[in-house]
């Protein structure tokens, strides 16, 4: 059973930054898997934000996040991070990390992922 745990969410003013972390429960090594970040705002569908593939750690971003968000792996800490800069009120959402052992490429389709964390709330407001 794959268990993912997100952390790092909170309240930040517009223009501010947050770094989200996605860690794995013991016995599961994130290095071997494609990891994606999704977000879901109230009343909206869950949407893909960024992912990092297992083969070469290539990062991928949704168009609205390019240049503002950075995804990375820390293999020593078995953690994937999402650095979010220049945050906007429209970035307010619950952010989830997800993975699926069968996935070897980046996908922003929620149906491609079987394992999800519990989510962490990000609120961008004054």
Image (cartoon, helix red, strand yellow):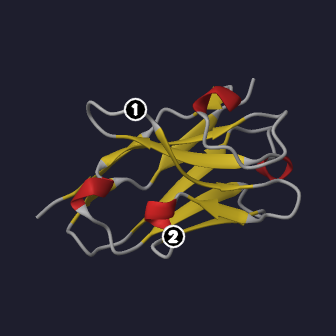
Q: Residues within 10 Å of mark 1 (few under 14, many from 20)?
A: few
Q: At which x and y percent is residue 40?
A: 39, 38
Residue under label 2: 66
Q: Nearer the viewer, residue 121 or 107?
A: 107
Query: Taking 121 as reference, is 24 left or right?
Result: right
Q: Determine whether the residue tagged by mark 2 lies in a helix, strand or loop.
A: loop
- Please give left or right for residue 79 compared with residue 97 in the image: right
Q: Earlier in the sequence, mark 1 or mark 2?
A: 1
Percent of width and height locating residue 52: 71, 57
Tag 1 secondary structure: loop
Q: In which quarter of the image is the N terminus?
A: top right
Residue wearing tag 1 = 45
The mark tally for this picture is: 2
- What residue appears at the point 66 percent right and 32 percent down from the top-left corner? 3
Residue 115 quadrant: top right
Residue 120, x across and y down, in percent = 41, 43
> Could you tell me which residue is drawn at 36 percent across and 72 percent down?
17
Check the image and report above or below for 96 versus 64: above
């Amino acid at each position: 059973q794959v268990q993912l745990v997100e952390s790092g969410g909170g309240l930040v003013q517009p223009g501010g930054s947050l770094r989200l972390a996605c860690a794995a429960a013991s016995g599961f090594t994130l290095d071997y898997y494609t990891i994606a970040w999704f977000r879901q705002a109230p009343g909206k569908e869950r949407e893909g934000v960024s992912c990092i593939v297992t083969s070469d750690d290539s990062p991928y971003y949704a168009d609205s996040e390019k240049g503002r968000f950075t995804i990375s792996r820390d293999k020593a800490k078995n953690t994937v991070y999402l650095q979010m800069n220049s945050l906007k009120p429209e970035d307010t959402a619950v952010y989830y990390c997800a993975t699926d052992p069968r996935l070897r490429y980046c996908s922003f389709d929620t149906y491609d992922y079987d394992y999800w964390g519990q989510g962490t709330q990000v609120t961008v407001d004054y």
